Image (cartoon, rainbow, N blue to C red):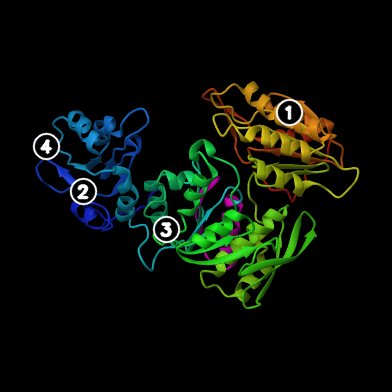
């Protein structure tokens, strides 16, 4: 995830390129320091990823300090080491008689992104891709896929950094984090620039902002989808969660913003953004620069009209189910318009290529048609509610059967809420395991079941509630219960192909299990129009 060619710079030249607001980095004198400036061609914070010529930045960790691994980094070819005051003490001992120069900065995390930007020359004026950043609780992945599909329809080469994959033109790299660490981000952006990529979209999670993974990156347009309860294990409160998202909409991080304002959080983002902002409303409950109207169901998707501040109109089609995907499509369209693309050009591209029916693995992914068998990533209460509402067929004989669980070692408070959400919106609720991690899976299921049963009993709901583990067996039971006119929704894991249980990754792909169950129970093969994994 680096460019093929990097111009070697002395450490002095690298440090000269840092933003003025950062305090100067100090060189630490050692007995073997010959005073020769190091020649730097890369940056890493992981000693296992060091290449010859790298600046190894040793950060404090939860268990050990990165300086503990300074000797390994130097043995692998690190040309210089940068760390904080405690790290200097450790590094001096670890490096022994090494002549590799040692530098100090505090807090050292502040320097990672800016240094990576300088070394990889990731965002030089005039020759880098148009860069989009998308944040929000739900819809980030789909919106970035819509952005790259629309830019491709406009004839531009595209790149993508997100939950599912990292892509630079035809080069695809599996993704581990929603947003990689900042040295990787800058390396990828430099690789895209080197390969002539003209437009790129990046998912920007609250974790990436909190952990400084997008430091040194400045987006052309940042987009906001929504904010609902999630990740409170990290942020502690919705207000702190909001603050992490809002930090993206500052002048040092983006030039412009496009914000969906159909919830109060979006309206606050728009009001408090420190940059030029366009607003978008799908529901019509908020005043906005761009508004959606004339939403009509067409097959699984919708057509809709997007009207701008001067009365300009686009008639667009989104082939993915759910009005929330209409919102994602509208956001993507206005983000592209915000870069200066003309309305007529966007309409022609949309008409010719149908970019908002692009394949998004594990996001409202149709695996079978009778019964409708769908896999989606919905893993928090709001996403689950929207997804269940969107798959409900207006047919009195059709039932919705949902299979889902909750992730271990994450926000515990959302588990009973998800159970209640499913009980209110589905006819059959099958509670199973998601990724338990190091938690007891039965205890997680119990939390979800309490919410489901409490809602059913207190509100006199008619849903059937079943507990089944393991997950593959739960999927099979759902298909066994289904009739041809029903909808089977497997929610929570989307594109993921591993289930982590007690530190062990077990192979599990909901799409594979759902296809196998459909075949096993005698349902017809999925149509040729299904989205492949």
Category of crowding for the residue at label 4, using alpha-carbon neighbours closer than 10 angstroms: few (below 14), some (14–19), many (at least 20) = some
Q: Please tell me which of labels 1 and 4 falls first in the chain.
A: 4
Q: Give the Cα distance between marks 1 and 2.
A: 56 Å
Q: Give the Cα distance between marks 3 and 4.
A: 37 Å
Q: Is residue 365 visible?
A: no
Q: Is residue 425 visible?
A: yes
Q: Give the Cα distance between marks 1 and 3.
A: 44 Å
Q: Residue beneath label 2, please?
A: 25
Category of crowding for the residue at label 1, using alpha-carbon neighbours closer than 10 angstroms: few (below 14), some (14–19), many (at least 20) = many
Camera-side residue of 508 and 333: 333
Q: Residue at x 16, y 29 (%)?
A: 96
Q: How many marks?
A: 4
Q: Give the Cα distance between marks 4 and 2.
A: 16 Å
Camera-side residue of 368 and 136: 136
Q: Residue beneath label 4, please?
A: 30
Answer with the quarter of the image where residue 154 lies: bottom right
Q: Please tell me which of labels 1 and 3 falls first in the chain.
A: 3
Q: Name the spot of residue 191 as percent of width and height, x first.
A: 40, 54
Q: Please tell me which of labels 3 and 4 falls first in the chain.
A: 4
Q: Is residue 95 left or right of residue 210?
A: left
**CB of mark 2 within 8 Å of CB of mark 3?**
no
Q: Residue beneath label 3, please?
A: 253
Q: Name the spot of residue 448 as percent of width and height, x first.
A: 68, 30
Q: Please tell me which of labels 4 and 2 falls first in the chain.
A: 2
Of circles 1 and 2, which is in front?
2
Q: Residue at x 87, y 37 (%)?
A: 483
């Amino acid at each position: 995830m680096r460019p093929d060619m990097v111009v070697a710079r002395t450490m002095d030249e690298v440090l000269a390129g840092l933003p003025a607001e950062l305090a100067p980095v100090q060189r630490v004198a050692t007995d073997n320091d010959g005073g020769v400036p190091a020649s730097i061609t890369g940056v890493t914070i992981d000693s296992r990823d060091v290449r010859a010529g790298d600046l190894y930045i040793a950060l404090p960790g939860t268990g050990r300090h990165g300086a503990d691994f300074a000797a390994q980094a130097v043995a692998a070819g690190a040309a210089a080491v940068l760390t904080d005051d405690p790290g200097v003490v450790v590094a001096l001992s670890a490096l022994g008689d090494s002549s590799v120069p040692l530098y100090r900065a505090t807090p050292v995390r502040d320097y990672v992104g800016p240094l990576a930007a300088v070394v990889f020359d990731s965002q030089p004026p005039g020759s880098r891709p148009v860069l989009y950043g998308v944040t929000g609780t739900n819809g980030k992945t789909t919106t970035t896929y819509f952005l790259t599909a629309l830019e491709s329809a406009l004839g531009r080469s595209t790149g993508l950094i997100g939950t599912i994959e990292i892509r630079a033109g035809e080069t695809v790299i599996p993704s581990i984090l929603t947003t990689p660490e900042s040295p990787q981000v800058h390396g990828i952006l430099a690789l895209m620039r080197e390969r002539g990529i003209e437009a790129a979209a990046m998912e920007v999670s609250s974790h990436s902002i909190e952990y400084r993974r997008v430091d040194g990156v400045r987006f052309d347009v940042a987009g906001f989808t929504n904010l609902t309860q999630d990740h409170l294990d990290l942020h502690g409160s919705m207000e702190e969660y909001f603050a992490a998202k809002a930090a993206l909409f500052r002048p040092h991080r983006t030039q412009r913003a496009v914000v969906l304002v159909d919830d109060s959080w979006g309206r606050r983002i728009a009001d408090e953004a420190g940059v030029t902002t366009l607003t978008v409303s799908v529901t019509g409950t908020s005043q906005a620069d761009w508004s959606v109207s004339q939403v009509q169901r067409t097959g699984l998707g919708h057509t809709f009209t997007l009207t701008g501040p001067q009365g300009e109109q686009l008639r667009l089609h989104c082939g993915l189910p759910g009005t929330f995907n209409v919102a994602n499509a509208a956001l993507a369209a206005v983000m592209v318009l915000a870069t200066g693309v003309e309305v007529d050009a966007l309409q022609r591209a949309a008409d010719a290529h149908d970019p908002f029916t692009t394949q998004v693995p594990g996001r409202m992914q149709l695996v079978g048609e009778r019964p409708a068998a769908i896999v989606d990533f919905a893993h928090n209460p709001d996403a689950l509610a929207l997804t269940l509402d969107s798959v409900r067929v207006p047919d009195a004989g059709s039932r919705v059967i949902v299979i889902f669980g909750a992730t271990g070692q994450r926000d515990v408070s959302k588990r009973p809420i998800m159970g209640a959400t499913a009980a209110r919106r589905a006819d059959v609720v099958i509670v199973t395991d998601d990724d338990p991690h190091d938690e007891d899976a039965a205890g997680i299921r119990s939390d979800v079941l309490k919410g489901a049963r409490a809602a059913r009993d207190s509100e006199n709901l008619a849903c059937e509630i079943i507990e089944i583990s393991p997950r593959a067996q739960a999927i099979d039971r759902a298909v066994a219960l289904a009739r041809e006119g029903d909808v089977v929704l497997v929610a929570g894991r989307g594109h993921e192909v591993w289930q982590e249980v007690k530190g062990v990754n077990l192979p599990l792909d909901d799409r594979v299990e759902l296809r196998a169950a459909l075949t096993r129970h005698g349902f017809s093969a999925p149509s040729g129009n299904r989205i492949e994994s």
